[in-house]
């Protein structure tokens, strides 16, 4: 990219000029009309999710390159589809921009989205661009799922095991390292890089869905409750319990964190990152014990049965070794939009 092109600003080429630039990132057979038409096969439900990301809230040039911002935006929406049990079909992108934003920044944003989406054969099928005082990215993702295999927050029942598909806290740790590089003095370069990458390039757990279908295949599939942990592990479990009218007990030592934490963070800080850090994009699933054990075995390292669903409404963190007192989990310690 020559210097003249790299210095161009969005206001220099206007809406239509920018749209023309961005069309090369989209599927040419689909874009061009007022809406995208997506064909689904018989016996499938269309799943739609929307996520909005705002400069200074969800991403910042201090911690996130345009490519990483695009990747994270796409990954967040794909993770929501995975949390519903749905396979992705495509996304639309709504983009609000100040006129002073460089065209090259926008192209790099779309490049990051494309890099993430290509892993899952998911096209950009359209969108909209508007002038805005703050850079805002709104993505709508479409997916499909067999109606009998939809994952819902409200399907947890007493006795279900709670499966967490991977470790938690890495993304929050990566963000802290980006904001405060001096914290990395006890980490090896590879360890620091891995934590930062967990924040900048999270992986939506769409890979879990084929395993779920395999282990639960039967004429009458068992309902599975779940959601992703993008707002924190504690948030996910509390939201599932609220929607299902149940409680939960989690085992302290089954809340798995990156091995790096053992020598780097005190236990209470590591636990806080895991429970409330957010943006790890793992799945939290509630299902019968036998299926839960089979799922954990198939997923391998990082996956664990973190606890069980109980009667009542309390979500309790319990240490079977009784070295730490019981702790009632709540949403006040995690990030909440418009929170005090």
Image: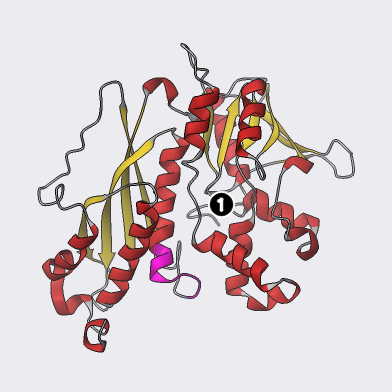
The question of residue 310 being in magenta is answered with: no
Rendered location of residue 56, percent (x, y): 44, 68
Q: Outermost residue, top direction?
A: 219
Q: Which residue is mark 1?
A: 280
Above or below for 101 versus 39: below
- Residue at coordinates 45% horizontally, 39% vertically from top-left? 82
- Residue at coordinates 86% horizontally, 45% vertically from top-left? 324
Rendered location of residue 81, percent (x, y): 41, 39
Q: Which residues are magenta?
A: 62-69
The reply, left or right, for residue 138 in relation to residue 38 is: right
- Residue at coordinates 27% horizontally, 54% vertically from top-left? 93
Rendered location of residue 218, percent (x, y): 49, 14
Q: Secondary structure at mark 1?
A: loop
Above or below for 173 versus 35: below
Q: Nearer the viewer, residue 123 or 53?
A: 123
Picture quarter with the N terminus: bottom left
Give the crowd class for mark 1: few <14, some 14-19, many >=20 residues within 10 Å: many
Rendered location of residue 178, percent (x, y): 58, 72
Q: How is the image coloured?
A: secondary structure
């Amino acid at each position: 990219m020559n210097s003249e092109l790299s210095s161009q600003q969005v206001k220099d080429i206007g809406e239509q000029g920018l749209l023309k630039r961005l069309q090369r990132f989209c599927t040419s057979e689909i874009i061009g009309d007022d809406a995208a038409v997506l064909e689904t096969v018989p016996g499938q439900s269309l799943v739609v999710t929307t996520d909005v990301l705002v400069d200074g809230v969800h991403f910042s040039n201090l911690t996130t390159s345009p490519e990483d911002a695009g990747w994270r935006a796409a990954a967040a929406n794909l993770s929501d589809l995975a949390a519903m049990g749905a396979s992705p079909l495509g996304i639309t992108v709504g983009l609000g921009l100040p006129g002073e934003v460089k065209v090259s920044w926008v192209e790099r944003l779309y490049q990051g989205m494309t890099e993430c989406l290509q892993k899952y054969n998911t096209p950009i099928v359209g969108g909209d661009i508007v002038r805005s005082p703050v850079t805002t990215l709104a993505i709508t993702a479409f997916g499909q799922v067999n109606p009998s295999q939809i994952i819902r927050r409200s399907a947890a029942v007493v006795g279900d095991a709670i499966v967490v598909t991977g470790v938690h806290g890495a993304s929050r740790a990566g963000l802290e390292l980006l904001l405060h590089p001096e914290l990395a003095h006890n980490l090896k370069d590879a360890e620091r890089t891995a934590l930062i990458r967990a924040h900048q390039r999270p992986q939506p757990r769409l890979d879990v869905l084929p395993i779920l279908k395999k282990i639960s295949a039967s004429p009458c599939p068992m309902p599975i409750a779940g959601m992703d942990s993008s707002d924190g592990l504690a948030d996910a479990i509390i939201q599932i319990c609220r929607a299902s009218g149940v409680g939960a007990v989690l085992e302290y030592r089954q809340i798995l964190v990156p091995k790096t934490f053992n020598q780097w963070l005190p236990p209470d800080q590591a636990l806080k990152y895991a429970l409330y850090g957010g943006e790890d994009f793992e799945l939290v699933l509630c299902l019968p014990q036998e299926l839960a054990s089979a799922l954990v075995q198939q997923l391998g390292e990082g996956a664990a049965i973190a606890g069980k669903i109980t009667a009542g409404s309390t979500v309790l963190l319990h240490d079977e070794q009784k070295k730490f007192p019981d702790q009632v989990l709540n949403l006040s310690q995690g990030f909440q939009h418009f929170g005090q």
